[in-house]
């Protein structure tokens, strides 16, 4: 077994070759008689952003929860920073679709939760909470409760809570799926700005093709029953990305390619019905 060392935050082997932050090998998941996905292989590098997209029920969220250690695989292997995933681990944070906030805690108390669980000093917690609240644009709302702020603000709070623990791996499950279209677009560009300031390995699940192309360095397309990796799409759009990115011809080409890939089965099924 080769030793693993840390160099500037990126894990490398003793031979000097960089190893991925996340390595998924022949992963499978089954619930009783239902096989969700099979033989999924994926590597995610340091500071890489990977979007996972696919039809409903293909196991996108299940795979993300397996990476987070919330669910065990039923087949294959999953490693984060070279270590097998056997449960939630330090350095990995997750942002949930429906915010996942404690309704009895204020915005500041929700952001501080992970830091308190990690046993950090009160003064360090206060400093990090203030920094992260400012980073996501919630300054002035520290003492509000979740029910007193909008859905977009609640999602900003969930993001701040994840960022507060300074994760090396950030997992996002449809992070903007529960907000309106206008708020979703605002949050997308806010997240892009935050990632530019604090780049980290990020894996996010989305149903939005535009979001996947805008955010990702690669797009993993899951298809089939059980699902598997149908295609890996390289997103060769320049960074930093902004609203201007949406107007690039290459953005439109990539969007159309992913759309055609996802819709091929639906179009074929519709054609069979019409016949």
Image (tube, rainbow, N blue to C red):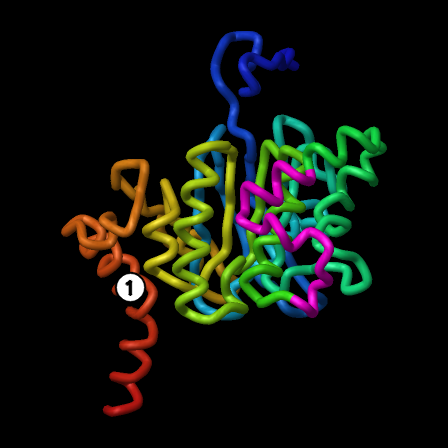
Q: Residue 163 at x, y = what percent?
A: 61, 40
Residue drawn at (49%, 42%) of the image = 41
Quick one: SS at disc 1?
helix
In percent of the image, x 76 and y 34: which residue is there? Answer: 125
54 w.r.t. 113: above or below: below
Name the image quarter holding residue 212. Answer: bottom left
Taking depth in this image into account, of 83 and 152 the one nearest to the observer is 152
Residue 262 seen anywhere in this rendered image of the structure: yes
Q: Which residues are magenta?
A: 129-148
Q: Is any atom of residue 28 visible in this view?
A: no
When the figure is inspected, residue 119 is found, relative to residue 69, above or below; the finding is: above
**Residue 176 position within the rendered picture, expressed as x and y whole percent measured from the top left:** 50, 61
Q: Is residue 68 left or right of residue 259?
A: right
- Residue located 40% across and 55% down the image: 221
Q: Is residue 27 magenta?
A: no
Task: In the displayed orientation, state which residue is furthest to the bottom.
Answer: 274
**Residue at mark 1:** 259
Tell me if mark 1 has few (under 14), some (14-19) or many (20+) residues whose alpha carbon lies within 10 angstroms of its own: some
Quadrant of the snapshot with the C terminus:
bottom left
In the rendered view, does 242 fall on the left or right side of 118?
A: left
Foreground of the two, 133 or 214 = 133
Spot occupied by residue 216 in the image (x, y as percentages of width and height): 38, 45
Q: Position of residue 35 (x, y in %)?
A: 61, 64
The residue at the far front in this view is 140
The quarter of the rendered structure image containing the N terminus is top right
Q: Residue at x 56, y 56 (%)?
A: 173
């Amino acid at each position: 077994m080769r030793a693993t060392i840390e160099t500037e935050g990126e894990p490398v082997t003793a031979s000097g070759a960089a190893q991925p932050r996340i390595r998924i090998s022949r992963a499978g998941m089954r619930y009783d008689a239902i096989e969700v996905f099979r033989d999924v292989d994926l590597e995610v590098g340091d500071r890489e952003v990977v979007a996972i997209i696919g039809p409903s029920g293909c196991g996108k969220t299940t795979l993300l929860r397996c990476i987070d250690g919330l669910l065990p695989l039923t087949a294959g292997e999953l490693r984060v920073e070279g270590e097998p995933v056997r449960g939630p681990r330090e350095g990995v944070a997750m942002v949930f679709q429906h915010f996942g906030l404690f309704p009895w805690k204020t915005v500041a108390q929700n952001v501080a939760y992970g830091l308190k669980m990690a046993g950090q000093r009160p003064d360090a917690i206060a400093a990090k909470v203030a920094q992260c609240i400012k980073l996501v644009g919630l300054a002035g709302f520290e003492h509000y409760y979740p029910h007193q702020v909008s859905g977009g603000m609640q999602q900003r709070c969930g993001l701040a809570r994840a960022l507060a623990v300074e994760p090396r791996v950030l997992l996002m499950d449809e992070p903007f799926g529960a907000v309106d279209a206008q708020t979703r677009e605002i949050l997308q560009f806010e997240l892009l700005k935050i990632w530019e300031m604090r780049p980290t390995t990020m894996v996010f699940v989305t149903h939005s093709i535009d979001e996947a192309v805008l955010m990702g360095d690669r797009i993993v397309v899951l298809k089939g029953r059980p699902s598997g990796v149908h295609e890996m799409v390289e997103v060769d759009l320049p960074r930093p990305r902004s609203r201007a990115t949406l107007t690039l011809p290459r953005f439109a080409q990539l969007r159309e390619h992913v759309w055609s890939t996802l819709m091929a089965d639906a179009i074929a099924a519709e054609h069979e019905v019409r016949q």
